[in-house]
Amino acid sequence: MKPHEHAATFGSTNGELRLGGLPLSRLAARVGSTPFFAYDRGLLDQRVDRLRAVLPDRVELSFAMKANPMPAVVQHLARRVDRLDVASGLEMQTALDTSVGADRISFAGPGKTAAEIRQAVAAGILVEVESATEFRRVLAAGDDLGLEPTVAVRVNPDFAVKGSGMRMGGGPQQFGIDAELVPALLREYATAGADVLGFHVFAGSQNLDADILAEAQRRTVDVVSDLAEHLISPLRYLNLGGGFGIPYVERDRPLDLERVGATLLELVEGPIVERMPEARPVLELGRYLVGECGVYVTRVVDRKVSRGTTFLVVDGGMHHQLAASGNFGQAIRRNYPVTVGNRIDGAPGGAVTVVGCLCTPLDVLAKDVELPPADVDDLIVIFQAGAYGLTASPTAFLGHPAPPEILV
């Protein structure tokens, strides 16, 4: 997708990008400073509505808060989704402050501390155990608190998902328990005092290929239905993961969501209802829910030409939007969609390179991009900034202040 296509998603007024119904310059004045992140609640609602229209009714939608844990975003989505998934004690507290019941919150991720697990058990949150050690910690917390913890086992499947931005299943992994070890684990702790509801499989992230996702979901259902035979109670929780990608660079094509939905319908009406009739399948999405609904806005503070290259120097940079800069020097750096937010209708004025304010040559937000003519005080907008932006960036690098985040 090209930058103008992303801009069209948000809309414009008199040549200015519009966010939450406001022209960008007015929004910047309202925020009071640049840079900042802005998330559009209307686009969040549209994304949830589109998912609801395509996914089978039986499939529950869970928001993986790690993608964007801003409290206002979480509060908004909590009213639209069925569940929340957290990956730390702080995310857990944010989730518990919403209207979502504790029994609709799951806690996943490796390296859970005993204190975090105790918090989760005390709250009544579903703990997705990633090792035998975590299982024992859950049981110890339950014994100490006089509670029966609810547990799901995160499974590291025996297959990998090709085409994913990050592979999180198959082969040796820090995520989950190897599928072949799960039956013995379930036997060992069958009567130890926890209610094992089911399983979680998350094999890969940022995938744009509907066929690959469909195959992964089919194989996940096969793996889980076999493991369900080792539970002492019927399987009630079936987290199929997510991994739905969004287009970041021009060559990317959006995920064919309808094809994914069709596969899920086949699975729900076939092997899931036949072999696991009490299971409520869960689709856990983070990036796909919020990624395309946010932008990073930064102001040009200098324009300079060095040996034929025009640089737009902005007041933001990789310390806020690491992914757009290339993640500390990835092998092949590709530009995220970018525009001059207050001049989006302008004709291209020649190639420029947008750089941040940090003392490193890695601080590049866009390299050799054709943009409308821009100068000091113009507003540069990086699209696809709603997920893994601020909280996934080295905000303390060189001591610049953290940018505001707003939901409009």
Image (cartoon, rainbow, N blue to C red):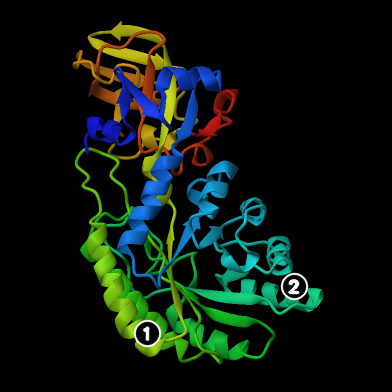
- Image location of residue 146, percent across then percent down: 80, 78
Q: Residue at x 39, y 74 (%)?
A: 157
Position of residue 382 relative to residue 134, above or below, is: above
* Apparent side of residue 323 relative to residue 65 in the rendered image (left or right): left
Disc 1 secondary structure class: helix
Asked if one can make out residue 357 in the rendered structure from this viewpoint, the answer is no
Q: Quadrant of residue 168?
A: bottom left
In percent of the image, x 65 and y 50: which residue is there? 90
State the image coordinates of residue 2 (x, y, percent, origin top left).
22, 34
Can you say which quadrant of the picture contains the N terminus? top left
Reading the image, the residue beneath label 2 is: 141
On the question of residue 119 being in view, the answer is yes
Give whichever of discs 1 and 2 has the lower sequence position: 2
Vertical placement of residue 301 versus 13, above or below: above
Residue position for label 1: 273
Estimate the x, y position of residue 183 in percent, counting from the top left: 50, 87
Secondary structure category for the residue under label 2 = helix
Which quadrant of the structure image shows residue 188? bottom right
Mark 2: give few (<14), some (14-19) or many (20+) Cα within 10 Å. many
User: At which x and y percent is residue 99?
Assistant: 62, 56
Q: Closest to the observer: 77 or 93?
A: 77
Q: Amino acid at mark 2?
A: Ala
Q: How far apart, in angstroms, are the residues tagged by discs 1 and 2? A: 34 Å
**Picture residue at 63% right of the left edge, 62% below the top:** 112
- Crowding around mark 1 (Cα neighbors within 10 Å: few <14, some 14 to 19, many 20+) is some
Residue drawn where x is 61% and y is 90% of the image:
190
The amino acid type found where label 1 is placed reads Val
Viewer-proximal residue among 403 and 12: 12
Which of label 1 and label 2 is nearer to you?
Answer: 1
User: In the picture provided, is 62 more to the left or to the right than 252?
Assistant: right
Horizontal side, residue 260 vs residue 408: left or right: left
On screen, 170 above or below 48? below
